[in-house]
Image: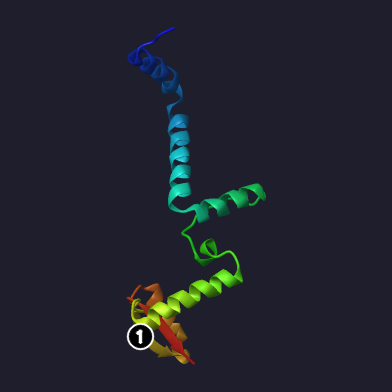
Amino acid sequence: MNISFKSYWNLLSDHIRPQKRQFILLACMLFGSIALRILAPQIMRSFIDSALAGKSLFLTRPSLHHFTHDPRELAERAGDVLRLIAGGSLKLAIDRTLPLERAAEAHRLLESRATSGKLLLIP
């Protein structure tokens, strides 16, 4: 049986139209899943592990634990960053330093987004 593309498209559209909302949701989930697998596989792995473990699911921005799998890898990555800083290839932006006694002020500055780099507390 041969069917033209236009006839196939019309048949598919007639089938999808009553279920449009579910179809759009499914398409978004599918394309989102594909994008996560390509762009951030560490996040997708964490998401799948949580789902399989029966934990509640949520998505958030990646943090350090998404990119390191064990203490050895963390130490290796930290060493790479420190070598780049020491070599001048990576610049560390320090906005200001404050004594530890002014920690409340530092917190207010961070909350109000009044800093444009790291804020260091000095003991």
Does residue 95 sit above or below 2 in this rendering?
A: below
> Quick one: SS at disc 1?
strand
Locate residue 83, reporting x and y percent. Answer: 43, 80
The residue indicated by pointer 1 is: 96
Does residue 70 sit above or below 85 in this rendering?
A: above
Q: Residue at x 64, y 52 (%)?
A: 55
Q: Is residue 88 left or right of residue 16?
A: left
Depth order, front residue of 27/121: 27
Name the residue furthest right: 53
Depth order, front residue of 103/27: 27
Locate residue 82, reporting x and y percent. Answer: 44, 79
Does residue 52 sit above or below 107 in this rendering?
A: above
Depth order, front residue of 34/88: 88
| Colour scheme | rainbow
Instruction: Report the amino acid beneath label 1.
Output: Arg
Name the residue furthest top: 1
Image quadrant where residue 7 sits: top left
Image quadrant where residue 110 sits: bottom left
Q: Residue at x 46, y 75 (%)?
A: 80
Question: Can residue 112 be seen in this snapshot?
Answer: yes
Question: Can residue 56 be seen in this snapshot?
Answer: no
Q: Residue at x 44, y 35 (%)?
A: 27
Locate residue 1, reporting x and y percent. Answer: 44, 7
Within 10 Å of disc 1 (Cα), the crowding (few <14, some 14-19, many 20+) is few
Does residue 50 sit above or below 19 in this rendering?
A: below
Q: Residue at x 56, y 69 (%)?
A: 73
